[in-house]
Amino acid sequence: MYKGDKKAFFLLLFFLLFVSLNAQNTKMVLIKKGSFVPLYGDVNKKSVTIDAFKMDIYPVTNEEYLSFLKEKASYRRSVIKRIFADISYLEYWKNDLDYGENNGKAPVTNVSWFAAKKYCEYKGKRLPALDEWEYAAMADQKHRDARTKVAYNNDILGWYEKRNTFNRSVGQTCKNYWGLYDMHGLIWEWTFDFNSIFLSGESRKDRNTDVSLFCGGASVNATDLMNYAAFMRYAFRSSLKANYSSRNLGFRCACDVK
Amino acid sequence: MKTKRESVKRIYGVILIVMIVMIGCKETTPAKEHNSVALPEKIIADLTPPPMVPKPVANRKASKLIVNMEVKEMEGQMVDGVTYVYWTFGGSVPGSFIRTRIGDEVEFHLKNHPNNKLPHNIDLHAVTGSGGGATSSLVAPGHEKVFDFKCLNTGLYVYHCATAPVGMHIANGMYGLILVEPEGGLPAVDREYYVMQGDFYTKGNYGEPGIQTFDMKKAIRENPDYVVFNGKVGALTGDNVLRANVGETVRLFVGNGGPNLVSSFHVIGEIFDRVHIEGGSVINKDIQTTLIPAGGAAIVEFKVDVPGTFILVDHSIFRAFNKGALGMLKVDGPEDKTIYSGTTQEGVYLPEGGTIQHLPTDKNTPKKNRVQTLDARITAGKNIYSRTCLPCHQSEGQGVVNVFPPLAKSDYLNKDVNRAIKTVLNGLSGTITVNEKTYNNIMTSLNLTDDEIADVLTYVYDSWNNNKTNVTAAMVKEQKTKKKE
């Protein structure tokens, strides 16, 4: 009896542990603390430290976004205020609560930064910071930092030249070192401070986003002139405003580790 | 409220204008045009894809000119069987031609198609101002940016996208030309065309089929697979040749988008009567080849006096032969034998001493025995092929698409062996059809012996799925004597 109880107790414990782990794992993975040198950012081109955080494994899908809109009426296409989302917000949906012929498992795009931020807050999460996103995205399948690998760069550059990848289901690209899917190869993603790079810091006080990112100007503060893929991401973010939406731009959420 | 205020303003404005006019009347001298006076007309610019050019605009007054330019990322053909994702201004490479005149105030609308993946901007070299417009025009997909500039300098200018990484945007085709005509315009000519060179860097080598993506490493090493006019191999050959008639004056607006190479622009068989050097105001005369820097342009003008096909090339000539930098201007009309006669005589050349001198041969080496096995002859033929035929017909007999016909599995070759022998003996020019594609090029007569011709043709017939005809020296001799008759 005694022995059996003990066994049952352990089994239960194990089960509970499994369930709780699984609950976390279905949606998010842990990105461990570490440091890296971003393409732009630090004034002295030194590395920045990223504290451990958790990140959604997949970008938010049409289906998931629909369930959010059912709860949050003010973010529906017909009622959202123009300062929060421009006229192309969810432009490809059939109506407020129907994404029509589009793939439900495909990432939701044509969402503004405001809407993406609200979605994450609604889920008890937040948008990943720019540096967090870049830190998690520099991994390939085997390495935390694959930025110097030729294949890694070629794959990403290849995607930038493919058209209309936005209607593919999430989770079909390779799983990276952290267990994340679709960081590259599907869509662009919003980050919390997408427009922060050139706007502060004494060495760049009278630069704005555009000035630094045209022609040779882009190379002045960059740390790695061979990282074309990253140049394109930073250039893309610089072209955005928070109420913009774009057919190739979606998002995923992150949260702190408590 | 707002409209009320505006209308009040408008009334004040009208009163002011009336007062100015009254003052003007009193002085009786006509009011002089001044820079600060708002331009009266608002015109939407006529934009054209290459090789076309919009009509001259200098006969109108300086105006407010609205340019609507849409950026499209689209798949296109680099050469038959090879596709490439081009990034374009207006859906073509080079982008739409913009024609303005001095004093125009341009209101530039840059629109980025919603399905595009990338942000873009535009740097027009005709703009005086920060970034040539690039600082004001970075535009996200699905958005539009507007900026104004005034045309202060005349000339032919390049425009291009300048979004990071800038080289990649240019390498994918984001460049074009904008012309600012002088007061009164450029002198009238009969034909105007738009030609722009660019270098392309692809994962696969020249002609490797399928979708080819941009190769960053090759671009940084400045080692292009394609150097072409108007965005693709054959954009100005075949059905797409430029045309003119004898006696007409042709003006080419020639640009070089780069991103890396400098062009030695030349038209085979013509001399440029006038060249606006680097697209500016200085005119040089009687020019054979004009240098066009990456990110630069030139206006070349010449009268076509005789009929024929004149070949546009980058005279860094391997680019023309092997990478695609080749276009054609076809001129129709009556011949003028005093300017160009064509071949007037053909004969045997016997230098003094009677016969061609041979280098002394080692007496110990036996004279080549021509009774050779087929294998030996094929090996010999292969060597002849490598040094004589390969530069054009390529290592696997595949030829160069649209330029040099293939020898591999060639219907033209297999159908008529005597025709093949005559081609090697005498050369060939004019239009022929090989494997359902037409070629119009020139093969020169080759200085080979009967044995050599027999061997090389036997090798060619033995290779690449051809019909294995055994060509003998006797067959060659027969064709040779036929020719003499």
Image (cartoon, helix red, strand yellow):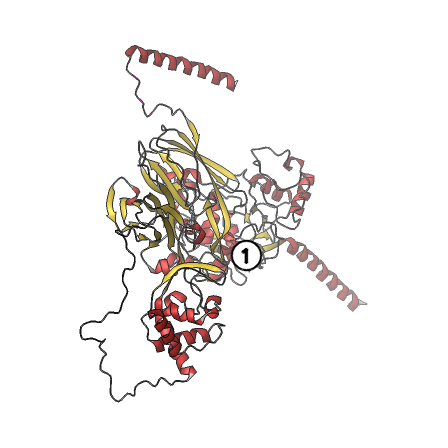
Q: Residue at x 57, y 44 (%)?
A: A247
- B479 above or below A213? below
Where residue B206 appears, x then y in whole percent?
43, 61
**Chain under disc 1:** A
Residue B33 lies within the magenta run: yes
Location of mark 1 (residue):
A32
Q: Is residue B128 visible?
A: no
Which of the two residues, B3 or B349, is positioned nearer the viewer here? B349
Q: Residue furthest left?
A: B352
Determine the main secondary structure of the stretch shown in magenta.
loop
Q: Position of residue B181 (x, y in %)?
A: 33, 35
The residue type indicated by label 1 comes to: Lys
Asked if residue B243 lies in the magenta stretch, the reply is no
Query: Measuring 56% from the left and 41% from the top, which residue is drawn there?
Result: A245
Instruction: List x then y, in percent, for residue B41.
Output: 41, 26
Give the residues in magenta.
B30-35
Q: Is residue B44 above or below residue B161?
A: above
| Foreground pick, B455 / B46 | B455
